[in-house]
Amino acid sequence: MAMSKKITIYDEKKGYGSNAQTGIANSKTIWCSEEEVSVRNSFYAMSAGITISKQVVIWKREYNGQSYAEFSGVKYKIVSVHNSRDSALKLLVILERRN
């Protein structure tokens, strides 16, 4: 699985360390790969009242607890982050589209 797409992960904060015009802090654009949302993850999310929009894999060392993402011009909330099933160096990130 090639990391061939880019995703921007960030936090929305006001105050010290954030961009005063955008309210974005801790922002970075990183490489990722998009995956099909599994039936298992969809079921667990729906039972919690969440609609999964995207599922991406990123390198573990690049994630620092950010809460939001922008992928292909669309903004998402990071709902869940856990180890990828194929590598201890990667994270599976579950995204929910923001309104």
Image: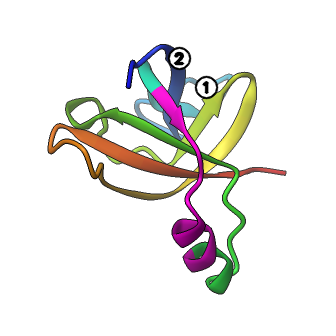
Pick the residue in front: 91 or 87. 87
Q: Is residue 85 left or right of residue 35?
A: left
Q: Give x and y (percent) for residue 77.
A: 61, 51
Furthest residue to the top? 4
Q: Give x and y (percent) for residue 25.
A: 47, 32
In the rendered view, would you say 55 is above or below 1? below
Q: Is residue 58 left or right of residue 12?
A: left
Query: In this figure, which residue is indicated by the disc labeled 1?
Result: 20
In the rendered view, would you say 80 is above or below 99? below
State how far apart marks 1 and 2 are (Cα). 28 Å
Q: Which residues are magenta?
A: 33-44
Q: Is 41 in the magenta?
A: yes
In the rendered view, would you say 29 is above or below 33? above
Q: Secondary structure at mark 1?
A: loop
Q: Give x and y (percent) for residue 26.
A: 41, 31
Circle 2 residues within 10 Å: few <14, some 14–19, many ≥20: few
Query: In this figure, which residue is indicated by the disc labeled 2?
Result: 5
Pick the residue in front: 80 or 37. 37
Question: Three-letter amino acid code at disc 1?
Answer: Ala
Q: Mark 1 vs mark 2: give the one in front.
A: 2
Q: Secondary structure at mark 2?
A: strand
In the rendered view, would you say 75 is above or below 31? below
Q: Please identify the quarter of the rendering in which residue 21 is found.
A: top right
